[in-house]
């Protein structure tokens, strides 16, 4: 939700900021702006639109100055207007500020400041911060910022520059992510690592209620009482080339194609050394969106093979009830970004009740990672497309590894069975490449269906969450209304919607549990004139006689079919979105990491 970057250097900084900002566009893209200091004057250009559109309108990269801030917005407080775009300023125009987060007491503060004579030019909570710093400034900007931060309720990642002092850039954070990048005679701030990887891979993770003061030569960190803090410098392993689009038209397509290698990397990790799980009697998975779907697959895997009861909760719901957490309950938050506000809050709620936390995250150094007792990493690398693809299959891989580990600890899986199951898992990377070979066929199907207004996704057992995920992918990138349902539930209501205008995508992989039942459900659809696309197991010729279209995926054990069935659904959503002329990397209204409630 909003991306911020800032830099202080010896070189002209606007082109660098612009390039970095584009790497953060997945966090929001309704307006953008950039501020630099030229001859002790802050110059700001901002406009509504995606970053390239804004650059075309106002020529952001031509700004001069070696210190600056930039922002791409996902609006929370105040509608999408030029006035509400960041950076924002105080009355005297001495400071410029960019912000990611939400200030909950902004209305009270705005009223007090207005009473004191401050004039506002936007509806945002961010502008309130600028005026409050102005109000608190007695000649020392860092002290003024510290005092201001103590008056704010809510979340913030902030970048601040001051016309009177163009030799320092100030940053602060609470509950919204912010990293400091350390270069040679230049230093950076950014919401996320990909934004600055081209400049440096040496970073400091800012913690809650810390203030960073950056000059060209050094970075100093303070708490809100002005005490200096020593921080560790960490090296990020992701490389900037991999974070780029390379030859692909969109990040989403690139990330779909990367899945065989990201799974291969993810499955190499050893779960044993992480946390002692012998005493675990119950598991609660908390997550949002696609990560929640991964949790549902995980529930199936763990209960089936490790025989431990699992509940999967929407993090946003979990945090606002009074969940019962008994001794030996393990909480497993799942999050690609590691910054999702609801998941982080659910984690904290569980911790206050004494639970142990084992997180599954993709972004190293993220808030969820740092709040956890132990972490299992999905090694998907930077996921830029707003629609989660490679992070999802990496989450399924980690959940399977965790399942096998728990099965071993609980003696529910004999050694030879574990070895066979690992062998099956190792087949997945190659099988994903085979599933991607269906692309031309999937493209043709997308051409047949891209003008439809609705779609129904059906699956049973472990593939029911994959039906949910397929529907979510289609919704978010193509804006077609889609629903995922357990196949057998269809006859309890949604069957009323079936006609030739409502394509039904049914996951009907060959297994000895649900296959025949799903076939019956498919027949219920075709009997009512419905059009069915089946995701089926290679070699299943019979199913082709029963449905309108088939997309084949390779055969593997039942419990691993979600990793393969997901691939054609991702490709189908991607091609439908592009046929409808939508940018799948930046769906409207969405942001990649949802750091507000
Ligand atoms: O970063 P997280 O995994 O915590 O994000 C959770 C959801 O916001 C995310 O999965 C969202 O649903 C995606 N846009 C789905 O593609």
Image (tube, rainbow, N blue to C red):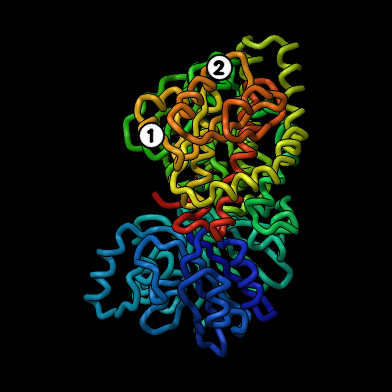
Mark 2 falls on what kind of element? helix
Q: Residue at x 63, y 28 (%)?
A: 544
Nearest to viewer (mark 2 / mark 1): 2
Q: Is residue 319 left or right of residue 393?
A: left
Residue farthest to the bottom, as pictured: 39
**Label 1: which residue?**
318
Asked if residue 26 can be seen in this view, the reply is: no
Q: CA distance from mark 2 to mark 1?
A: 36 Å
Q: In screen coordinates, is 402 left or right of 247?
A: left
Q: Residues within 10 Å of mark 1 (few under 14, many from 20)?
A: many
**Position of residue 126 measured from the top left corner of the image (x, y, whole percent):** 39, 68
* Camera-nearest residue between 118 and 213: 118
Instruction: Count residues near mark 2 (Cα–Cα under 10 Å), then give few for <14, some for 14-19, many for 20+.
Output: some
Q: Which mark is residue 31?
A: none
Q: Circle 2 is placed at which residue position?
A: 516
Q: Earlier in the sequence, mark 2 or mark 1?
A: 1
């Amino acid at each position: 939700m909003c991306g911020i970057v800032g830099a202080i250097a010896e070189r002209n900084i606007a082109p660098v900021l612009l390039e970095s900002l584009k790497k953060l566009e997945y966090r929001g893209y309704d307006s953008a702006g950039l501020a630099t200091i030229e001859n002790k004057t802050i110059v700001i250009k901002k406009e509504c639109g995606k970053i390239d559109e804004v650059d075309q309108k106002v020529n952001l990269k031509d700004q001069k100055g070696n210190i600056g801030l930039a922002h791409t917005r996902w609006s929370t407080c105040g509608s999408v207007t030029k006035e509400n775009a960041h950076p924002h300023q105080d009355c005297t125009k001495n400071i410029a500020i960019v912000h990611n987060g939400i200030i909950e007491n902004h209305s009270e503060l705005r009223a007090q400041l207005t009473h004191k004579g401050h004039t506002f030019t936007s509806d945002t909570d961010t502008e309130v911060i600028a005026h409050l710093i102005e109000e608190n400034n007695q000649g020392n900007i860092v002290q003024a910022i510290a005092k201001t931060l103590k008056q704010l309720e809510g979340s913030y990642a902030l970048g601040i520059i001051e016309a009177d002092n163009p030799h320092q850039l100030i940053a602060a954070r609470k509950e919204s992510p912010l990293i400091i990048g350390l270069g040679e005679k230049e230093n950076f701030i950014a919401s996320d690592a990909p934004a600055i990887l081209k400049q440096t891979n040496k970073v400091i993770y800012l913690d809650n209620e810390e203030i960073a003061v950056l000059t060209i030569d050094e970075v100093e960190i303070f708490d809100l009482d002005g005490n200096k803090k020593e921080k560790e410098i960490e090296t990020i392993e992701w490389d900037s080339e991999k974070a780029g689009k390379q030859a692909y038209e969109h990040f989403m397509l690139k990330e779909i194609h990367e899945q065989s290698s990201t799974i291969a990397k993810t499955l190499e990790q050893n779960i044993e050394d992480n946390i002692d799980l012998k005493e675990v009697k119950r598991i609660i998975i908390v997550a949002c969106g696609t990560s929640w779907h991964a949790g549902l697959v995980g529930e199936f895997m763990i209960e089936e093979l490790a025989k431990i009861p699992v509940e999967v909760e929407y993090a946003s719901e979990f945090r606002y009830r009074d969940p019962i957490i008994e001794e030996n309950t393990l909480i497993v938050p799942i999050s690609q970004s590691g910054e999702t506000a609801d998941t982080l809050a659910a984690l904290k709620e569980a911790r206050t009740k004494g639970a142990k936390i084992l997180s599954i995250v993709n972004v190293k150094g993220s808030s969820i990672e740092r709040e956890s007792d132990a972490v299992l990493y999905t090694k998907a690398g930077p996921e830029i497309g707003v629609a989660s693809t490679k992070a999802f299959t990496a989450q399924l891989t980690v959940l399977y590894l965790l399942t096998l580990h728990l099965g071993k600890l609980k003696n529910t899986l004999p050694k030879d069975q574990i070895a066979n199951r690992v062998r099956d898992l190792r087949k997945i990377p190659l099988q994903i490449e085979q599933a991607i070979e269906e692309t031309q066929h999937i493209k043709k199907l997308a051409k047949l269906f891209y003008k439809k207004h609705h779609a129904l996704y059906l699956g049973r057992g472990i593939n029911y969450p994959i039906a949910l995920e397929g529907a979510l992918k289609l919704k978010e990138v193509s804006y077609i209304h889609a629903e995922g349902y357990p196949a057998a539930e269809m006859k309890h209501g949604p069957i009323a919607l079936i006609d030739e205008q409502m394509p039904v995508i049914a996951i009907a992989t060959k297994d000895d549990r649900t296959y025949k039942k799903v076939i019956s459900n498919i027949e219920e659809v075709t009997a009512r004139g419905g059009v069915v696309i089946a995701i089926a197991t290679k070699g299943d010729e019979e199913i082709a006689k029963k449905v309108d279209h088939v997309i084949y995926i390779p055969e593997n054990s039942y419990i691993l079919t979600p990793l393969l069935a997901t691939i054609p659904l991702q490709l189908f959503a991607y091609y439908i979105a592009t046929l409808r002329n939508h940018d799948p990397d930046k769906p409207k209204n969405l942001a990649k990491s949802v750091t507000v409630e």
